[in-house]
Image: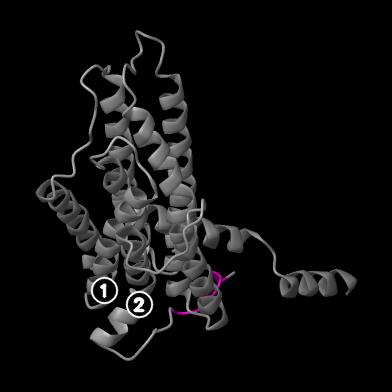
């Protein structure tokens, strides 16, 4: 039985730079609005709610709906990833980073429990988002690294926040940095052959580390903490990097698994033919 057919990925614009910019628009717009919210440039009402973050989420939801109506798969994936990063991963990482800056956190004092559980929750969330990335990238496994790139870049962007109190402004700034670099990676990937997409994602990650160091964005960790605090931060970083490197392989594996399921699962046509043969 032949493998399931896949609709080829649609172009999102005319060939060339314009098409690349349009393809990266979900991440670039997210970065732009997040930076505007962090800088206070956008005229937002003063309330007790995270209005700027809610505005970014509303933009991403609207973009996802538009991508679905226009049947633009690449857009839908990036809008969905940007939304997951903003609404789920960012709060989880911000809480982890805030707990890691609490004084006297160590195994010996018995005060590391909350930090450990929040870190485990962040790892579970990263795993779920990574599995989703693999399953939605089966038609283009080589692009899975670029789909995962915003999440991979958000981890160091949040953990490197130099302040002890990670508020909405600090979170939006980290989101802007991650999505801007991820958008640049997607833009460059649109202009490059498929074999270079994973190296482009790796270069974007290395560029972010260099950018954060140049900005002096280093974690503000109290000196009286135990080794568990930096160890858990390194664990999150290594997990994000490993998932970035393995994303294309995971998407290819998901594709092969789907093809195998299609081969062993009878189709309605095959069932009808088998039933007609039995009646004869």
SS type, badge 2: helix
Q: Compare residues 198 and 120 and report the one nearer the observer.
A: 120
Residue furthest to the front in view is 46
Confirm whether residue 80 shows in the render.
no
Kindly indicate the quadrant of the structure image that contains residue 25.
bottom left
Q: Which mark is residue 187?
A: 1
186 or 177, which is in the foreground? 177
Q: Is residue 95 above or below residue 257?
A: above
Q: Quadrant of the C terminus?
A: bottom right
Residue drawn at x 27%, y 48% as measured from the top left: 157
Of all residues, the one furthest to the top in this rendering is 108
Pinpoint residue 191: horizontal percent, then vertical percent: 23, 78
Q: Quadrant of the N terminus?
A: bottom right
Pointer 2 with pointer 1, Cβ within 8 A:
yes
From the viewer's perspective, is residue 119 above or below residue 280? above
Circle 2 sits on which residue?
23
Q: Range of the magenta residues?
A: 2-8
Residue at 21% from the left image edge and 63% from the top image edge: 200
């Amino acid at each position: 039985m032949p493998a399931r057919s896949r609709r080829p990925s649609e172009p999102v614009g005319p060939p060339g730079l314009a098409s690349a910019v349009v393809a990266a628009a979900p991440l670039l717009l997210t970065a732009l609005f997040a930076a505007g919210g962090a800088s206070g440039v956008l005229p937002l009402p003063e309330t007790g709610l995270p209005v700027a973050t809610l505005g970014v989420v509303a933009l991403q939801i609207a973009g996802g709906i538009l991508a679905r109506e226009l049947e633009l798969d690449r857009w839908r994936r990036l809008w969905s990833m940007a939304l997951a990063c903003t609404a789920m991963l960012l709060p989880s990482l911000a809480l982890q980073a805030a707990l890691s800056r609490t004084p006297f956190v160590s195994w010996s004092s018995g005060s590391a429990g909350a930090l450990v559980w929040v870190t485990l929750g962040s790892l579970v969330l990263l795993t779920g988002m990574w599995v989703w990335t693999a399953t939605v990238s089966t038609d283009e496994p080589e692009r899975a690294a670029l789909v995962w790139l915003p999440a991979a870049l958000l981890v160091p962007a949040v953990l490197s926040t130099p302040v002890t109190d990670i508020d909405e402004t600090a979170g939006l700034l980290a989101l802007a940095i991650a999505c801007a670099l991820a958008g640049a990676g997607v833009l460059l990937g649109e202009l490059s052959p498929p074999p270079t997409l994973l190296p482009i994602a790796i270069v974007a990650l290395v560029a972010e580390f260099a950018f954060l160091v140049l900005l002096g964005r280093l974690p503000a960790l109290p000196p009286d903490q135990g080794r568990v605090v930096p160890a858990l931060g390194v664990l999150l970083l290594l997990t994000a990097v490993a998932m970035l490197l393995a994303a294309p392989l995971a998407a290819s594996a998901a594709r092969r698994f789907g093809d195998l399921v299609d081969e062993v699962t009878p189709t309605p046509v095959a069932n009808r033919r088998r039933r007609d043969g039995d009646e004869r």
